[in-house]
């Protein structure tokens, strides 16, 4: 047994060092061939999932479908991870490192407007209200893509040097039973907390996201910071209620709120170094008062704080608190500031990104571009904090359309050109195999 393990390690070292190009070529050829053969099943699965979307932490039907397909492949499958997630492990026959591939499964409280034969008519419960549900961010495509990649890689088990772990993650968009006090845990963070990245521990983790406004089949990537952090900002300004005709008898939280809104604009424009990365502090809601001639007791404001750097992020939090509290104090009011850290910035490991760029170019047939910073956030960031990560965008807008006019992700008109999905399968499968072969004989 020991001799066999040594012989395998020597063989893989020779493969990586002397015959790597041939092995890479044959492996990629098999991935491309199998991805094409699996395309009908890929589309069938995606359309099934699209017609039956489920909100965060309610993805029971989706998880059952995923687990059933993975079990049919003969993989080691664990369900109920982070409430409704699924994890599967593929152990290659040869020694090598471990890679993880991730797809998210949840949908959004959005009403679909398309006339597709598989358009969603689903309903769900979001914040205790019945809502329409749609895969308006393409997670149905992510799930179908990863299932196809898993099937391809499983078929290569006997020559696979290492281990591949498949994360089918719930609640990327957040739980549908969101708790106002902030005691919520998004899917990826909960999966990490439950130890999915400890046994086995991946040496690298990969993910992709379908994206509107990018030509179908094109891949966009970015080394380093790629998506922003996202933190909830909640402000309560406490004044003193009085008659609006006698404002001097009270403390007006509406006036203080208006000053706070203006003051917050200076946090980024005057107090934050944006020479490296931009930042955003935005207020989305202001609520206060019940009648035109009553100055209310309090005003509530909510918003978001976004950045791409951990140090800048913490400084923004401190500056926002100081600005709000001091403005309130100057008006005789009090301010209660709550900042809930939701998503970390998604940071692509620069070295890993550079090493895997040839893989992306092969998968997309050289149609690869370096994309801009994205103001949205992704909880893939929690996986990428535990292991070197690479997260890329797959274009799904038909090439004959004006990219600038494509309905964006999270829009009722969001549309996926399904011709791009096979590119996604090639991407995830080849990221796994290329990484494993490049590091053959290491680990396991």
Image: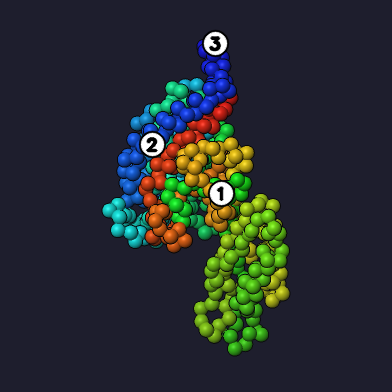
- Decide if residue 88 is on the left or right side of residue 370: left
Q: Position of residue 226 (x, y in %)?
A: 58, 50
Q: Do tag 3 and tag 1 residues touch (Cβ < 8 Å)?
A: no
Nearest to viewer (mark 3 / mark 1):
1
Q: Nearer the viewer, residue 331 or 381?
A: 381
* Quarter of the view holding residue 13: top right
Closer to the observer: label 2 or label 3? 2
Q: Is residue 39 left or right of residue 267?
A: left
Mark 1 neighbour class, 10 Å CA radius: few under 14, some 14 to 19, many 20 or more: few
Separation (CA) of disc 3 from disc 1: 46 Å
Q: Tag 2 or tag 1, which sits nearer the N-term? A: 2
Q: Residue at position x 60%, y 82% from top?
A: 242
Position above or below: 283 against 109 = below
Q: Earlier in the sequence, mark 2 or mark 3?
A: 3
Residue at horizontal 63%, vertical 59%?
A: 279
Classed neighbour count for the residue bearing mark 2: other residues with Cα under 10 Å, few (<14), some (14–19), many (≥20): many
Residue 318 can be seen, yes or no: no
How far is mark 2 from mark 3, CA to CA?
36 Å
Q: At x 65% / y 79%, what residue is drawn? A: 251
* Circle 3: element type: helix
Instruction: Indicate which disc residue 35 carries.
Output: 2
Q: Nearer the viewer, residue 166 or 209?
A: 209
Whether pointer 2 and pointer 3 mark residues with C-beta atoms closer than 8 Å, the reply is no
Residue named by callout 1:
370
Measured from the top left, where is residue 168 in percent x and y?
Answer: 45, 41
In percent of the image, x 38 and y 33: which residue is there?
A: 33
Determine whether 407 is above or below 154 in the image. below
In front of the other: label 1 or label 2? Answer: 1
Name the mark on residue 3. 3
- N-terminal of the two: label 3 or label 1? 3
Task: Indicate which disc residue 95 carries.
Answer: none
Quadrant in which the C terminus is drawn: top right
């Amino acid at each position: 047994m020991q001799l066999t393990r040594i012989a395998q390690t020597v063989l893989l070292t020779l493969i990586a060092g002397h015959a790597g190009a041939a092995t890479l070529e044959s492996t990629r050829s098999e991935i491309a061939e199998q991805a094409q053969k699996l395309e009908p099943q890929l589309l069938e699965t995606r359309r099934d999932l699209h017609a039956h979307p489920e909100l965060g932490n309610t993805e029971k039907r989706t998880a059952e479908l995923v687990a059933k397909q993975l079990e049919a492949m003969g993989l080691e499958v664990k369900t109920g991870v982070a409430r409704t997630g699924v994890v599967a492990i593929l152990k290659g026959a040869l020694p090598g490192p471990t890679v993880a591939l991730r797809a998210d499964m949840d949908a959004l409280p959005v009403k679909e407007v398309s006339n597709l034969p598989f358009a969603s008519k689903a309903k769900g419960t979001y914040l205790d209200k019945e809502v329409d549900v749609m895969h308006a961010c393409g997670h149905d495509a992510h799930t179908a893509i990863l299932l196809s990649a898993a099937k391809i890689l499983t078929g290569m088990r006997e020559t696979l040097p290492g281990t591949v772990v498949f994360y089918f993650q719930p609640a990327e968009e957040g739980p549908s039973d969101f708790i106002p006090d902030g005691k919520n845990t998004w899917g990826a963070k909960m999966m990490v907390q439950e130890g999915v990245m400890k046994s086995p521990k991946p040496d690298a983790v990969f993910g992709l996201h379908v994206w509107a406004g990018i030509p179908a089949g094109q891949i966009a990537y970015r080394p380093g910071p790629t998506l922003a952090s996202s933190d909830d900002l909640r402000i309560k300004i406490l004044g003193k209620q009085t008659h609006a005709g006698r404002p001097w008898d009270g403390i007006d939280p509406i006036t203080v709120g208006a000053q706070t809104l203006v003051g917050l604009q200076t946090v980024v424009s005057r107090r934050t170094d944006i020479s490296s990365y931009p930042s955003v502090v935005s207020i989305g809601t202001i609520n206060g008062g019940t009648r035109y001639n009553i100055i209310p007791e309090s005003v509530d404001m909510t918003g978001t704080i976004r950045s791409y750097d951990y140090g800048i992020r913490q400084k923004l939090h401190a500056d926002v608190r100081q600005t709000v509290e001091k403005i309130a104090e100057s008006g005789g009011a009090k301010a209660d500031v709550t900042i809930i850290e939701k998503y970390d910035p998604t940071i692509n490991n620069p070295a890993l990104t550079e090493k895997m760029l040839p893989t992306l170019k092969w998968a997309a047939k050289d149609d690869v571009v370096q994309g801009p910073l994205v103001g949205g956030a992704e909880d893939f960031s929690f996986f990428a904090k535990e292991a070197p990560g690479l997260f890329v965008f797959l274009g799904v807008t038909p090439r004959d359309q004006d990219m600038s006019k494509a309905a964006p992700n999270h829009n009722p008109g969001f549309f996926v050109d399904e011709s791009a999905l096979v590119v996604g399968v090639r991407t995830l499968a080849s990221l796994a195999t290329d990484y494993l072969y490049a590091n053959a004989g290491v680990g396991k």
